[in-house]
């Protein structure tokens, strides 16, 4: 029944409204991208762990991050298997090795080794994983199947998500055509016998998988009885916490510094010389996310990016709304003289803000979705438009517009009907 | 004795009786602008009463305070000193809710039209109607008939940018009238209008005043519409210099013209005399003047009636009965002798009285004084 003044104002001044919508849209797309990148970082941080089969993870207390995991005695892995709750306890090897780009016939004729386009023979850091081919530590069936081919230490599987700089035959990605290619991994020659699809995200540009024997050939500084991870699978995953405590007792690991109840426990926690630590999957994920989102500048950059986008949005929308109000001071003052309350005027401006937010959001969502696809196909980062991101950005868009609207309201309250005569 | 009031005769306060409801009552109103050293007084002890259904035109040079007074009455400014009652509410110290409520009972017409560019003429007018919660069906008819009367029948659904200046002003006028306000405050409402639409607007004002008891106060310099004013208020330097009920003044002038001494005076002089007269009241039995007293006032009977009694030493004899429009008390002023008769009110009466000095000043300016005097004295015998 009542005149939709906010809507009429928006649709009337199309130029100003377009600027507002563009402003909101710009901010919204920026936020979408930042949150998309942040999500991709979180996703890739645990990408390898997600593919591994474990309820509890053993790793060295000196573990830094995925490509610097340090090692511990393989005996600990077998020791864990002694508990009846444990169904499997598998050693897993993971480290950074060097991959020589295969010298293949597709290098341009006559190109020299110094030519930057000619990658052949160059060395690239690569994540190298070692697992028992007869009982691979992966939960994904496709990888388990492929791993069975690793019957010889000289055989490797290459991650088809690896970047083109690792020299696939087809030039853009590793495919069936690369099977049979030989190259060097670390100090020794290997043959590509198959592919698997994993993706390593931020940690590295490429990955390969081999057997434990293959791993120590690639990383000769590590002995075969020194492993990087122990993958403990339980009969009943819900017992993870209980089994963790049992294992801590077996390995002589104090509960933790923060849980210490007495001085003795605290001393023990600080002075422990336990050579292994035990984490549940949730703890692993938390640790990894924390490392990528908080410890590294990457996460901070994107979080800062979100705030910058919010401020840019507020600045633009505030400008649009306040110049809109400024151009209608007489009209708003007339409304006040007619007996419209400040409350009504506030509602009009806030409606206008929220409408601007919604009108700006919808197309930006579509554009951002396309950009996500683009980024994913170009960089290989897993960009997911989750409901959580959509809602977060929508709320932020509303917040941007409402904050700007509230700012612009100050001007409106100054509209003095006494100035009209 | 009669009770003398401080009410000027031309205020019209007694034209239709003392106690018609007052839409606006201004008492000892002062207003200041600025703070501290820069504080400057804009209004000086203003007094004004506007009755229900009256059309008041305010005039005066710019800076005389008429706009300030108008915004105070419109509750658009807060009252600082004095009393201001509008539609029965004291505005001095009124809270926001009351003010917002009160504003809905008023209609404002500003010099600038201030229409929302985004809304059509109809929607702009409707902004005022929906605020007071009129029935939408009735509102629709009312908006359309108002706009049609103002010559905008074919522009009802146009937006302001396709209307001319005069058309926009007429939309703004319709917006000020649509919700049947009890008080309309207008600032140069006809300035942007041609003769014909200006006339239509003031005719509308008159209809609202007559049919709905709407009170209208407008500031205007448009002398084409002076004829609709019931009262003309002239302000100079923050003071109400004159506040004249047009109808009442014309009645007084007619009465004064009936007095032979004044019959040749020009309307301007008569209006000046009327301006000087003050209201006196008497109830039945009051002696208005007493034989033998020194004469100090000239009386005109506005309402009621009196007996004229002469005491010849033995008894009081009634020599005449005077009614509305007649006068008494002039002889003592002309001859400078004591009162030659006693005048007693027969009923509740109202007189307009002129001071002796003023009376003589008027006579002195009259070129035909000598002749008129002789004529008057002769007619008495």
Image (cartoon, grey):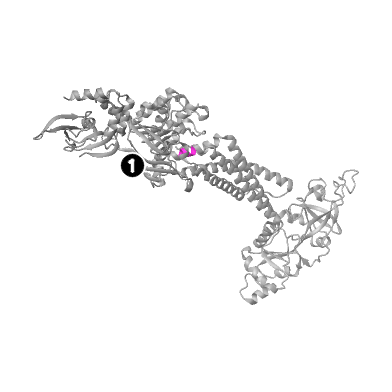
Helix, strand, or loop for circle 1? loop
Instruction: Tell which subunit mark 1 falls on.
Output: B
Could you tell me residue A250's position as x and y percent? 68, 73
Residue farthest to the bottom? A264
Considering the whole magenta stretch, tell me its main secondary structure: helix
- Compared to residue B74, the image places residue B188 above or below, namely above
Total numbered labels placed on residues in the image: 1
Q: Is residue A324 visible?
A: yes
Which quadrant of the figure contains the C terminus of chain A? Answer: top left
Q: Which residues are magenta?
A: A331-335
Could you tell me residue B258's position as x and y percent? 24, 25
The image quadrant of residue A71 is bottom right
Give B254 or A261, whichever is nearer the viewer: B254
Q: Which residue is mark 1?
A: B88
Could you tell me residue A249's position as x and y percent? 66, 73
Disc 1 residue crowd, few under 14, some 14–19, many 20+, Cα 10 Å: few
- Compared to residue A374, the image places residue B346 above or below, namely above
Give A75 or A7, whichever is nearer the viewer: A7
The image quadrant of residue A80 is bottom right
Could you tell me residue B55's position as x and y percent? 35, 31
Q: Residue at x 41, y 28 (%)?
A: B146
Which quadrant of the figure contains the N terminus of chain A? Answer: top left
Give A10 or A418, whichever is nearer the viewer: A418
Residue farthest to the left? B314
């Amino acid at each position: 029944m009542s005149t939709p003044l906010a809507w009429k104002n928006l649709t009337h001044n199309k130029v100003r409204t377009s600027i507002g919508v563009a402003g909101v849209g710009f901010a919204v797309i920026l936020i979408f991208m930042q949150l998309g990148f942040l999500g991709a970082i979180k996703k890739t941080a645990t990408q390898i762990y997600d593919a591994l089969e474990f309820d509890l993870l053993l790793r060295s207390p000196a573990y830094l991050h995925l490509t610097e995991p340090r090692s511990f005695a393989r005996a600990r892995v077998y020791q864990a298997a002694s508990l009846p709750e444990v169904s499997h306890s598998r050693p897993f090897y993971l480290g950074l090795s060097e991959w020589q780009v295969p010298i293949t016939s597709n290098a341009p004729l006559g190109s020299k080794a110094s030519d930057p386009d000619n990658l052949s023979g160059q060395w690239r850091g690569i994540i190298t994983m070692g697992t028992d081919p007869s009982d691979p530590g992966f939960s994904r069936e496709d990888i388990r199947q492929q791993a069975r081919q690793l019957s010889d230490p000289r055989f490797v599987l290459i991650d088809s998500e690896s970047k083109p700089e690792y020299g696939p035959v087809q030039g853009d990605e590793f495919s069936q055509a690369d099977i049979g290619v030989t190259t060097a991994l670390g100090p020794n020659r290997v043959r590509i016998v198959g592919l698997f699809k994993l993706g390593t995200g931020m940690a590295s540009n490429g990955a390969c998988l081999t057997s434990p024997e293959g791993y120590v050939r690639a990383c000769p500084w590590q002995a075969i009885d020194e492993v990087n991870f122990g993958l403990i699978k339980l009969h009943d995953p819900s017992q993870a916490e209980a089994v963790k405590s049992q294992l801590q007792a077996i390995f002589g690991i104090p509960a933790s510094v923060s849980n210490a109840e007495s001085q003795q426990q605290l001393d023990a926690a600080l002075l422990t010389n336990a050579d292994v630590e035990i984490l549940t999957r949730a703890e692993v994920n938390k640790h990894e996310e924390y490392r990528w989102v908080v410890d590294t500048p990457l996460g901070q950059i994107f979080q800062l990016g979100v705030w910058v986008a919010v401020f840019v949005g507020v600045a633009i929308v505030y400008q649009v709304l306040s110049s809109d109000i400024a151009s209608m001071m007489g009209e708003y003052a007339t409304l006040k003289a007619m007996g419209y309350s400040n409350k009504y005027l506030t509602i009009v401006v806030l409606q206008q803000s929220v409408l601007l937010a919604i009108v700006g959001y919808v197309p930006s969502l579509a554009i951002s979705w396309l950009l996500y696809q683009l980024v994913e196909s170009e960089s290989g980062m897993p960009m997911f438009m989750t409901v959580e991101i959509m809602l977060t950005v929508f709320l932020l868009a509303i917040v941007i517009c409402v904050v700007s609207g509230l700012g612009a309201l100050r001007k409106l309250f100054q509209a003095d009907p006494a100035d009209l005569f | 004795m009669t009770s003398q009031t401080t009410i000027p005769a031309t205020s019209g306060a007694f034209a239709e009786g003392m106690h018609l409801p007052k839409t606006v009552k201004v008492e000892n109103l002062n207003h200041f602008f600025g703070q501290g050293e820069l504080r400057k007084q804009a209004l000086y002890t203003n007094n004004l009463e506007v009755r229900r259904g009256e059309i008041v035109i305010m005039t005066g040079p710019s800076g005389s305070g008429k706009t300030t007074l108008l915004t105070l009455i419109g509750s658009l400014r807060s009252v600082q000193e004095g009393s201001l009652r509008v539609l029965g509410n004291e505005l001095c110290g009124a809270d926001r809710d009351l003010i917002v409520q009160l504003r809905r009972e008023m209609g404002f017409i500003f010099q600038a039209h201030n229409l929302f560019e985004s809304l059509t003429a109809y929607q702009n007018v409707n902004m005022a109607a929906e605020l007071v919660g009129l029935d939408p069906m009735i509102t629709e008819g009312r908006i359309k008939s108002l706009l049609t009367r103002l010559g905008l029948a074919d522009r009802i659904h146009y937006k302001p940018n396709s209307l001319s200046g005069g058309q926009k002003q007429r939309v703004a006028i319709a917006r000020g009238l649509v919700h049947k306000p009890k008080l309309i405050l207008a600032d140069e409402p006809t300035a942007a209008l041609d003769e014909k639409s200006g006339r239509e607007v003031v005719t509308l004002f008159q209809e609202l005043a007559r049919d709905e008891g709407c009170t209208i106060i407008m500031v205007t310099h448009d002398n084409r519409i002076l004829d609709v004013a019931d009262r003309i208020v002239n302000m100079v330097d923050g003071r109400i210099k004159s506040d004249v009920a047009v109808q009442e003044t014309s009645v007084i002038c007619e009465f004064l013209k009936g007095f032979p001494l004044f019959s040749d005076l020009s309307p301007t002089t008569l209006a000046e005399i009327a301006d000087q007269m003050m209201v006196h009241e008497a109830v039945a039995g009051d002696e208005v003047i007493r034989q033998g007293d020194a004469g100090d006032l000239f009386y005109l009977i506005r309402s009621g009636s009196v007996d004229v009694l002469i005491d010849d030493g033995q008894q009081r004899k009634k020599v005449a009965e005077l009614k509305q429009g007649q006068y008494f008390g002039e002889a003592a002023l002309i001859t400078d002798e004591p009162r030659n008769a006693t005048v007693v009110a027969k009923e509740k009466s109202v007189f307009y009285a002129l001071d002796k000095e003023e009376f003589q000043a008027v006579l002195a300016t009259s070129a035909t004084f000598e002749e008129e005097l002789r004529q008057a004295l002769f007619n008495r015998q």
